[in-house]
C-alpha cells in the first residue's frame, strides 16, 4: 500500500499551525506521531491535500506541574515519555499503566498522547485496504449512507479503542482546545461524540494543545485493566479505569470515577455506577449493584474481534476486580 499524493508542511510554531488549519480547512490534516494516521493514509481512509507535520513544535512536548498540584501534558508528548515520567508514575499511575499498554515500545516512542486522545474509531469494514473496500458499499465514515455493523442504523457504529482515554477520564482530566484567535477547556466526557463518525467534537480548524489533570484525592486508589488478544500490538477488546476515594480506613466511599473503553463508539463514563457507591460502605452486595449499573450504561457493540456479550462479561469482571482490590487496600492500610 502506497501513500496518496499530498503537500507536506512543517509549521514552526503553534500559531503558524493554527493559521494553516484556518487557511486549509477540511483539506488539511494534522500529523502528530503518525502511527495511526499514516496507516489510514495508506488505506486511503484519510486523503488530505495538506499534511501539517507537528513534529517540530517542541512547545507542545512537555510534562509540567500545575500550581494546584496537578499536571499539564503537552499533546506531542510521546507515550514512552509518559511511561518513563517519574512524576506521572507517582501521581497518576493508571495513566502510566495505560500508556504502557499501547502497542509496542517502538510505536510508543513516536505515538503521542494527543494522537491517542484523538484516535479514530475502528471497524472491520472500514480499517481495510482501499482494494478490499471496493467489495462493499460506502459506509458513513466514508461518506456513504449505511453502517455495515448494525443494519438500518442511522449512525456509524465503529468502536473507540484508545487506552489512555479511560485513564484520563477516571482522573477527571480536561482538554485545552485551540483554534486561531480562540481557546476553550473541555472535559474528557464531553469531547467525544456518541457516534463512530466523527469520533470527537474537533472542528477542522481546531486542535488539542494540552491535557490538564487535577490533583487527585489523597486517599484514592486507582486501577487500569485492559483485555486484548495479545499483551502488545493489539487494540483493546475492553479497557477500564477507575479511581475510588475513601473517607477514612473504614471502606466508606467518598467518591468514585469509572470509565470504560472498547465497548461502543465512545468512551463511557459511568454515572449511575459511581453514584450508587458515593457515601456508602463498600460491601460485596454493593459491588454487585455497582457492576450491574455500569453494565446497563455501556451498551456494547461489536464491529471488531469479539461479541457484545463477551465485552459485557469482561467489563463486569474488571469492575468487580477493581472495587474489591480498592476495598482490600483501604481496610488494610
Image: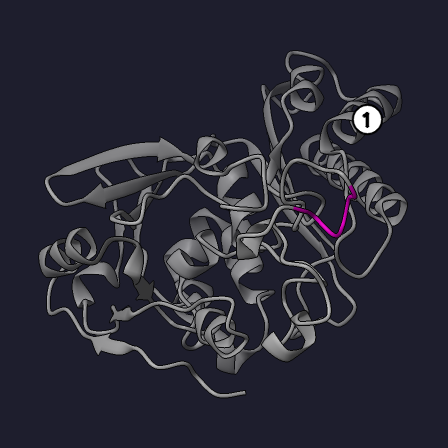
Q: Residue furthest bottom?
A: 2
Q: Residues within 10 Å of mark 1 (few under 14, many from 20)?
A: many
Residue 299 location (% of width, % of height): 76, 34
Q: Residue 324 falls in which quadrant of the image? A: top right
**Left or right of 198: which side holds 102?**
right
Q: Is residue 148 within the magenta segment?
A: yes
State the SS at label 1. Answer: helix
- The quarter of the image holding the N terminus is bottom right
Q: Nearer the viewer, residue 192 or 62?
A: 192
Q: Residue 14 falls in which quadrant of the image? A: bottom left
Identify the residue at image location x=79%, y=26%: 296
The residue pinned by badge 1 equals 287
Q: Which residues are magenta?
A: 146-151
- The quarter of the image holding the C terminus is top right
**Left or right of 117: which side holds 24?**
left
Q: Nearer the viewer, residue 211 or 196?
A: 196
Residue 209 location (% of width, % of height): 26, 50
Q: Compared with residue 293, is residue 219 higher up or lower down, i.e. above or below?
A: below
Residue 187 location (% of width, % of height): 41, 32
**Left or right of 317: which side holds 157?**
left
Identify the residue at image location x=38%, y=35%: 215
Identify the residue at image location x=59%, y=49%: 140
Amino acid at each position: 500500500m502506497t501513500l496518496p499524493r499530498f503537500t507536506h508542511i512543517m509549521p514552526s510554531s503553534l500559531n503558524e499551525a493554527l493559521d494553516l488549519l484556518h487557511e486549509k480547512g477540511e483539506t488539511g490534516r494534522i500529523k502528530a506521531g503518525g502511527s495511526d494516521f499514516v496507516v489510514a493514509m495508506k488505506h486511503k481512509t484519510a486523503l488530505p491535500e495538506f499534511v501539517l507535520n507537528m513534529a517540530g513544535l517542541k512547545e507542545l512536548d512537555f510534562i509540567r506541574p500545575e500550581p494546584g498540584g496537578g499536571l499539564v501534558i503537552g499533546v506531542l508528548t510521546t507515550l514512552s515519555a509518559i511511561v518513563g515520567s517519574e512524576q506521572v508514575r507517582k501521581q497518576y499511575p493508571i495513566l502510566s499503566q495505560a500508556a504502557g499498554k499501547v502497542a509496542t515500545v517502538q510505536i510508543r516512542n513516536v505515538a503521542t498522547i494527543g494522537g491517542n486522545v484523538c484516535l479514530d474509531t475502528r471497524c472491520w469494514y472500514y480499517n481495510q485496504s482501499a482494494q478490499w473496500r471496493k467489495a462493499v458499499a460506502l459506509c458513513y465514515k466514508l461518506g456513504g449512507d449505511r453502517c455495515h455493523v448494525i443494519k438500518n442504523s442511522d449512525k456509524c457504529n465503529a468502536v473507540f479503542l484508545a487506552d489512555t482515554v479511560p485513564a484520563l477520564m477516571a482522573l477527571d482530566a480536561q482538554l485545552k482546545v485551540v483554534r486561531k484567535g480562540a481557546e476553550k477547556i473541555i472535559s474528557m466526557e464531553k469531547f467525544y461524540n456518541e457516534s463512530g463518525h466523527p469520533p470527537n467534537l474537533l472542528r477542522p480548524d481546531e486542535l488539542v494543545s494540552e491535557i490538564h489533570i487535577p490533583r487527585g484525592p489523597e486517599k484514592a486508589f486507582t486501577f487500569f485493566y485492559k483485555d486484548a488478544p495479545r499483551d502488545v500490538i493489539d487494540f483493546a477488546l475492553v479497557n477500564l479505569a477507575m479511581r475510588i476515594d475513601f473517607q477514612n480506613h473504614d471502606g466508606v466511599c467518598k467518591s468514585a470515577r469509572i470509565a470504560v473503553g472498547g465497548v461502543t463508539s465512545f468512551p463511557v463514563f459511568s454515572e449511575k455506577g459511581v453514584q450508587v457507591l458515593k457515601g456508602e460502605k463498600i460491601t460485596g452486595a454493593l459491588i454487585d449493584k455497582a457492576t450491574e449499573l455500569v453494565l446497563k450504561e455501556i451498551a456494547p457493540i461489536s464491529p471488531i474481534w469479539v461479541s457484545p456479550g463477551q465485552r459485557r462479561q469482561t467489563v463486569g469482571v474488571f469492575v468487580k476486580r477493581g472495587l474489591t482490590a480498592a476495598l482490600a487496600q483501604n481496610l488494610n492500610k
